[in-house]
Image (cartoon, grey):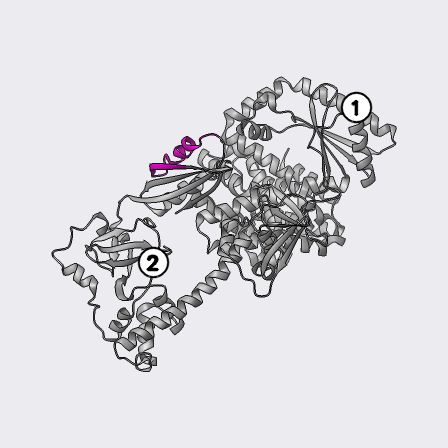
């Protein structure tokens, strides 16, 4: 089929969905894009316009609005068509231009390797550019079309796209309830990343396809008879479980013979009352599988998903997964949030829904700068890939939270002030600890007190990044104020010891000189730097006297009798000097890349701690500035303690050791501790730097049995 035929069929399809006025703009966009891409051919040897048309057709099936569809037609015109945001805005308006510009930026990004660090950075960028949910609709459709024609990409490019899709886009599709796209992306990623596994499952399905389809047809005919007898208008969709879904179950320890829900059916009726009538009829004829009935109509998910779910034993002995819903419910289940754009009267509600759905992205944006890569990985995993629970306020409002959330997570989801002032919680009319894990359908009441404040212990059990970020923000602000007050007291005390007046030292001219040398902006910054051990008072006074600081450091340098310096002397600069005896503190095990502080130890040179070490205390001028000697590019080995907490079961030590292979991390020793429901492994590991250590720690979260990974 040539491009003219493809375009004509596309325009005809659009006419079934959009008004005459909207169609004029759609045709205009098509003509504009055609001119931009004139003469260009894609890797599959087809006209370049086949791609934007294919992406737009995917979006039509998602019931998007005309703005999104027009942006889809134009989405390659900036990167590959010589257009600009200004030109698109002039011809098609600011909304379309904004979406096209954002998708153009996203499409210029790609993972350049398969490291977890790069994947984390990519996630942060995608999350940071998600202000308009329609950008994500377009990105998902674009990637789906690219993977459908993935066989034409070179091996490395395809590998990058598969990795991007798995670590970023599939979780986002799940979060936006776009299950149809999510399912196809999962299948395609498996097909390209593990072709042998994919083809093996496909062959096994094909080998039994005739029998499976016969079973499905017989069950469908039987349920159809039940519906006809009750004069229920209905449609039935049947399917065999997807290759990826089967792979996922096999990968979690199931054997082929133990996968009982390969056969699935969806019954679509006209009215909600008929949903309940239909499931009653099915349960009356077929024995329900215990624990499989879910009523998401009476209690919809927070993402607005509604349906009745059940599992039954068929007369043929097979197990069948059955969902019953109305047409509107089915549209939403297939297309997610995008389905709402089809109805103009719901536009204001859609904007509110977008804001609510994107809140989770914005929370991660707020926290991403203050979180370590491992913390961001945990947050992303919790918010995007784990199962959700749905809990209620006493007034009946429903909140969606990640599985494992606590009353503290619930409180912060309501409002920051509620979280900060929480003093207790009541769940289902019973007082519970703030650390208890909430369950589906719990009714939660939070007790607050105006004098209440967050507790640092909460950080040990909160689940959501939103709550964690708010708690850390509270203590960061509090600690900063404490550091400022502490620094002010140290500064004034040291000035008195040296018989210097505060006013004579802090003249405008002196402060300007100090701020310039130390790259500070205010007296408050100076106090904070002193209180947090960044600078000593002697350093500041020496700046004013224009002389080098002759302190214990110089004595160490000039002391011919001190112990022979250890290997770390070239790894760490002490007041910008090398060759000084340096020891790494065993209480916190700093590694190359950590923020560090030095403490002069009599006869032992300088002991280096992590700046967050609990053993670091103010001791006058014995603290010194230390930093990693990056120019020397040291290749030392650093020890660190890592605690891996796992669910109780088999011995997972071999799995953990396997993850260290290839990560530039070596496990030196292990201590195992058994708790009531958990097993923890305290690992003494050797590594070359912080990045290698964090990559290793992040990779452990790929195991489902791993609950927490932290440094001691």
Q: Quadrant of residue 526?
A: bottom left
Name the secondary structure under disc 1: helix
- Where residue 177 sits: x, y (%)? 64, 43
Q: Nearer the observer, disc 1 or disc 2?
A: 2
Relative height, residue 280 to residue 97 (above, below):
above
Closest to the observer: 670 or 46?
670
Is residue 588 left or right of 472 when viewed as pictured? left
Q: Residue at x 83, y 39 (%)?
A: 273
- Where residue 189 sits: x, y (%)? 53, 34
Task: Judge whether residue 62 can be spotted in this image.
Answer: yes
- Where residue 445 sits: x, y (%)? 66, 54
The residue that mark 2 highlights is: 616
Binning the other alpha carbons within 10 Å of mark 2 as few (below 14), some (14 to 19) or many (20 upward) gives some
Q: Residue at x 50, y 38 (%)?
A: 676
- Where residue 254 sits: x, y (%)? 56, 25
Relative height, residue 559 to residue 217 (above, below):
below
Q: Which residues are magenta?
A: 650-672
State how far apart marks 1 and 2 are (Cα): 74 Å
Label 1 or label 2, whichever comes before in sequence order: 1
The image's mark for residue 221 is 1
Closest to the observer: 2 or 499?
499
Name the secondary structure under disc 2: loop
Binning the other alpha carbons within 10 Å of mark 1 as few (below 14), some (14 to 19) or many (20 upward) gives few
């Amino acid at each position: 089929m040539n491009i003219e035929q493809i375009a004509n069929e596309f325009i005809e399809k659009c006419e079934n969905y959009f008004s005459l006025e909207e169609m004029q703009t759609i045709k205009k966009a098509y003509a504009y894009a055609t001119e931009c891409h004139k003469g260009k051919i894609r890797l599959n040897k087809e006209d370049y316009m086949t791609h934007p048309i294919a992406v737009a057709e995917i979006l039509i099936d998602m019931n998007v609005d005309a703005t999104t569809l027009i942006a889809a037609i134009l989405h390659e015109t900036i990167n590959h068509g010589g257009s600009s945001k200004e030109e698109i805005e002039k011809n098609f308006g600011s909304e379309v231009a904004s979406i096209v510009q954002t998708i153009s930026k996203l499409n210029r990004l790609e993972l350049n390797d398969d490291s977890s660090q790069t994947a984390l950075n990519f996630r942060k960028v995608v999350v940071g550019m998600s202000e308009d949910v329609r950008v994500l609709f377009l990105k998902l459709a674009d990637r789906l079309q690219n993977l459908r024609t993935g066989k034409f990409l070179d091996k490395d490019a395809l590998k990058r796209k598969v990795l991007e899709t798995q670590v970023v886009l599939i979780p986002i599709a799940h979060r936006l309830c776009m299950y149809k796209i999510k399912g196809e992306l999962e299948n395609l990623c498996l097909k390209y990343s593990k072709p042998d596994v994919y083809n093996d499952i496909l062959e096994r399905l094909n080998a039994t396809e005739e029998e499976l389809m016969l079973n499905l047809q017989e069950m469908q005919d039987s349920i159809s008879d039940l519906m006809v007898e009750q004069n229920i208008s209905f449609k039935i969709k049947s399917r065999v479980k997807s290759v990826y879904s089967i792979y996922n179950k096999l990968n979690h320890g199931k054997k082929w013979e133990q996968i009982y829900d390969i056969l699935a059916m969806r019954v679509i009726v006209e009215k909600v009352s008929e949903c309940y009538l239909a499931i009653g009829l099915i349960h009356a004829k077929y024995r329900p599988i215990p624990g499989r009935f879910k009523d998401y109509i009476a209690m919809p998910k927070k993402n607005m998903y509604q349906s009745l779910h059940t599992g039954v034993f068929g007369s043929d002995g097979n197990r069948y997964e059955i969902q019953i819903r109305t047409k509107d419910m089915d549209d939403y289940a297939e297309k997610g949030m995008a389905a709402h754009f089809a109805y103009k009267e719901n536009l204001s509600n859609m904007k509110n829904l977008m804001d609510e759905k994107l809140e989770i992205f914005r929370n991660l944006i707020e926290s991403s700068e203050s979180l370590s890569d491992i913390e961001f990985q945990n947050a992303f995993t919790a918010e995007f890939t784990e199962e959700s629970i749905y809990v209620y306020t006493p007034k009946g409002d429903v909140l969606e939270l990640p599985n494992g959330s606590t009353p503290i997570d619930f409180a912060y989801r309501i409002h920051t002030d509620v979280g900060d002032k929480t003093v207790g919680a009541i769940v289902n009319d019973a007082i519970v600890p703030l650390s208890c894990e909430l369950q589906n359908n719990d009714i939660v009441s939070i007790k607050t007190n105006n004098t209440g404040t967050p507790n640092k212990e909460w950080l040990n059990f909160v689940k959501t990044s939103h709550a964690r970020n708010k708690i850390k923000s509270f203590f960061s602000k509090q600690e900063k104020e404490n550091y400022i007050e502490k620094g002010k007291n140290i500064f004034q005390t040291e000035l008195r010891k040296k018989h210097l007046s505060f006013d004579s030292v802090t003249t405008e001219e002196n402060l300007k000189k100090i701020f310039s040398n130390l790259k500070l902006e205010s007296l408050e910054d100076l106090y904070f730097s002193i209180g947090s051990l960044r600078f000593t008072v002697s350093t500041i006074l020496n700046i004013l006297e224009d002389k080098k600081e002759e302190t214990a450091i110089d004595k160490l340098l000039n002391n011919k009798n001190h112990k022979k310096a250890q290997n770390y002397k070239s790894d760490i600069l002490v007041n910008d000097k090398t060759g000084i005896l340096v020891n790494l503190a065993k209480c916190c095990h700093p590694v190359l890349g950590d923020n560090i502080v030095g403490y002069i130890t009599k006869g032992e040179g300088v002991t280096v701690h992590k700046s967050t070490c609990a053993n670091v205390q103010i001791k006058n001028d014995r603290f010194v500035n230390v930093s990693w000697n990056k120019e020397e590019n040291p290749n030392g080995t650093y020890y660190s303690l890592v605690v891996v907490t796992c669910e109780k079961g088999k011995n997972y030590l071999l799995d953990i050791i396997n993850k260290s292979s290839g990560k530039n991390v070596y496990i030196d020793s292990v201590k195992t501790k058994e708790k009531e429901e958990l097993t923890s492994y305290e690992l003494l590991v050797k590594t070359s730097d912080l990045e290698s250590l964090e990559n290793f720690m992040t990779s452990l979260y790929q195991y489902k049995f791993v609950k927490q990974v932290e440094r001691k």
